[in-house]
Image (tube, helix red, strand yellow):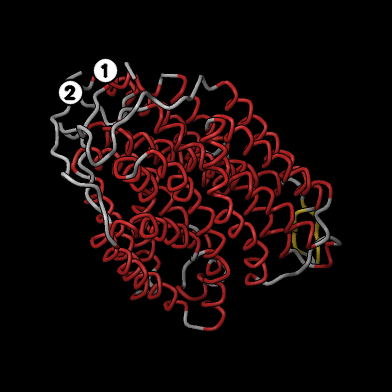
Amino acid sequence: MVSPAPIPAPAREPAGLRARLTIPVLAYCGILMAVMQTVVVPLLPDLPRLTGASPAAVSWMVTASLLSGAVLTPVLGRAGDMYGKRRVLLLSFTLMAVGSVICALTSDIGVLIAARALQGAAYSVVPLSISILRDELPPERRGSAVALMSSTVGIGAALGLPAAAMVVQYADWHTMFWVTAALGATGVALIRWAVPESPVREPGRFDVAGALGLAAGLVSLLLAVSQGGQWGWGSPRVVGLFLAAAVVLGLWWWQQLRAARPLVDLRLVSRPRVGLSHVAALLTGFAFYANSLVTAQLVQAPEATGYGLGLSIVQTGLCLLPGGVTMLLLSPLSARISAARGPRVTLALGAAVIASGYAVRIADSRDLWMIILGATVVATGTTLAYSALPALILRAVPAGQTASANGVNVLMRTIGQAVSSAAVAAVLVHHTSLVGGLPVPTLHGYLLAFAMAGAIALAACAVALTIPGDQEPAATPSPRKRTPALNDEAMEGA
């Protein structure tokens, strides 16, 4: 493999206010990205009335950002490795802010869906930020910063739901998008001011064919998974999409193995330390997402069901808030565990804690305090697992491929979440009873969903324990004084 051209590094260590604010600014961007993905949830029941569209069309407000995020995350990650991570980070955050402005200016469902697809570019914020932190921070500060950055996904989701619900309840719904647009514009300004451009790059020609092939395959796969419950799992559309995904992704895999500069280095992915980390990410994403989905529905169920609490969407968001606060507070602890025992142990421990949280949910899902306790335990495990995943990737890939490799890892989490959503919906649909003439999931259905998510978490724990030794590579120079780019041969010898 041809070694990347060396890129001059700044002559002195970063200092001053801007350098000290790099981590908080990147964390702010990660939290805002998660908030942006969550804010439409309280709107979904009312959007058919507000936009004059069907419920099926309105559901694309979530699906559009999921699809675009899944496609753009690995693509923008690779672009960041090649053209500059700060530059691509600015692009993705700008697209998110522009999407918010468009949503604030329209009530047309078609335009809203297109704007939400633009916002999906922000999914790449976390892998790009993690890569920047690796390049800019000394090893002793890197672990806690990466753990915090990875946890922002859960923190933002927990904060976004109650905040958006209150805006929807007390103000015009467009106000919510004006708020996210203003916060996004602030994020762009802060990135320009406080985040340095990484000197570590891997120059070459961008793999356009690989990007288009991955996009076509992922859209087919995720569209089938996300819409299967609505269109019918045996319908020609869904079966055709699954077949198309298999064919296109198979051809894409073949093309990537033969490309001189592939979008995704599949030889790197085939290494157990990288490939098993991606499998664990998929399973952890499944287990994590079920917590939010099931908890929100369970506490809002009518009291007439015998188990439901009849809570409002604002009260529901507040139930999930302790989990978000826990993720914020525990991210430094997860970094310390990884430093002492290795991220493989942290990942396995996190998955086991997630499973124990679901055990709490199965034991008691009627009392509010037990529901909050169980959801918070799941959030605690998610903090440990999500902070360990990027640490595993950073230890296993060359410095010039950290953004693209973390982008693939985030993609696997996203696929896990999409599959979780479909699986939970399928379980609940098959376990319903009539309450007030309307079909409502039974408590048994919710408990089965918890058991399924807990079993997947245990599978993630088992996969984590099979990951080969994750010791830190041999001494790496300080980011601001090293030779900027490491090639594959150098990393293999580390």
Mark 2 nearby-residue class (10 Å; few <14, some 14–19, many ≥20): few
- Quadrant for the C terminus in the image: top left
Tell whether 64 sits left or right of 335. left
Is residue 312 placed above or below 331 in the rendered structure?
below
Question: What amino acid does circle 2 point to?
Answer: Ser
Q: Position of residue 332 (x, y in %)?
A: 53, 48
> For the point 32% across and 71% down, which residue is it?
101
Q: Position of residue 488 (x, y in %)?
A: 27, 21
Mark 1 nearby-residue class (10 Å; few <14, some 14–19, many ≥20): few
- SS assignment at label 2: loop
On the image, which quarter does residue 393 sit in?
top left
Q: Position of residue 225 (x, y in %)?
A: 52, 41
Query: Between marks 2 and 1, how big is the CA–CA gap?
Result: 8 Å
For label 1, the residue is 489
For label 2, the residue is 3
On the image, which quarter does residue 365 sit in?
bottom right
